[in-house]
Amino acid sequence: MSETGESSTLAQPAGFRPERDPRAPHPVFQWPVKPQAVLKWLFGFPGLLWPVQAVLIGISFLTWRFLTPDTQTLRHFSADWVGFLFIRNVLLLTAFVSIWHFWLYVRKAQGSQYKYNANWLATDDPVFLFRNQLWDNVFWNIFSAVPIWTAYEAVGLWLQANELVPVVDWRAHPIYCTVLLCFGGVLWADIHFYFTHRLIHWRPLYRYVHSLHHKNVNVGPWSGLAMHPVEHVIYFSSVILFWIIPSHPLHAMRHLQELALGASLAHHGFDRLVVGEKATFDMEHYTHYLHHKHVQCNFGVDVVPLDRWLGTFHDGSDESYERLKNRLRARALRSRATVKKASAS
């Protein structure tokens, strides 16, 4: 793979390729607006809120209610409560990701059915720490992702406990807190991720930072947060929005947990989860798998269709692949022309 990933391996082992057409944007971004389709996308099963967001919101609420120090304690920085948050986050991340890893990669409950890449996680591969993809991924999760996640959370809780940033009472502003901030936070996370993701594909940052994450071409649940520490700082930085606008501490906690736990859902490598003997559950993360496969496409997670609007969308079709090749070829030609012009001057 080159520094920017343009020569990423394109011929992967045969795996599952969805037959559905993923090219249509979500109905909330279509015109004319179709209220019934929008409501189905928001509240249907599966939909934006159900079941994934509902589960993450539930985890955040329980964490806030039972596993977070009280406001009086948070007003004074202490290694005790920061350490408690760190251990809590390690256990939470490990439990959540391990459920997916155990079911899909240890027990192999559905074999390679609906798996995008027919291979399993790499072993005895010098590309990874310890020559093992799983342990490499676990290392970056526990020793980089969780400390940085915890640092953002601790700073935010301290700022809000001391009222150094605007704080709102959920009971006094239920619509603002529940509808605007919860739903808006999902959209903000996607917008922030798209543009910062494009940033770390800039050649120097890709070479020294983001290439670590892209070692995982054949992704697994632990690959989601297998990143360089600099990338973790950038990735979790979207929570700063909740230090600027009036919000409840639970909003920042939910946002950070969505980033941390949700990463495994975008990287488990399967298109559908088999439930029972025949029923399946659509996981809808094919576009991000294609990002790991082709590198220079699908920089967002497609809640806000920025890839479609800005010309970086790849739906897995041969037509999209040709567009990607043409775009990279044109960019390479422009780069060579710039270098040649600079040399001539």
Image: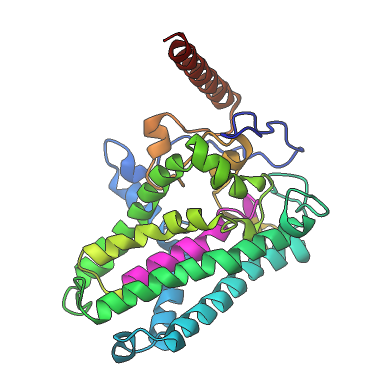
**Residue 22 within the magenta-colored segment of the rendering:** no
Up-down relation of residue 239 to residue 320 (above or below) = below
Q: Quadrant of the N terminus?
A: top right
Residue nearest the viewer, comparing 267 with 164: 164
Up-down relation of residue 11 to residue 222 (above or below) = above
Query: Residue 73 appears at what percent x and percent y?
Result: 33, 90
Residue nearest the viewer, comparing 57 with 324: 324
Residue nearest the viewer, comparing 313 with 226: 226
Q: Which residues are magenta?
A: 251-272
Query: Residue 257 appears at what percent x and percent y?
Result: 45, 68
Judge left or right: residue 196 versus residue 296. Answer: left
Residue nearest the viewer, comparing 227 with 276: 227
Q: Residue at x 48, y 85 (%)?
A: 84
Furthest residue to the right? 124
Up-down relation of residue 317 to residue 164 (above or below) = above
Judge left or right: residue 125 versus residue 213. Answer: right
Query: Residue 17 appears at what percent x and percent y?
Result: 66, 39
Query: Tag count in the figure?
Result: 0
Q: Quadrant of the C terminus?
A: top left
Furthest residue to the left? 172
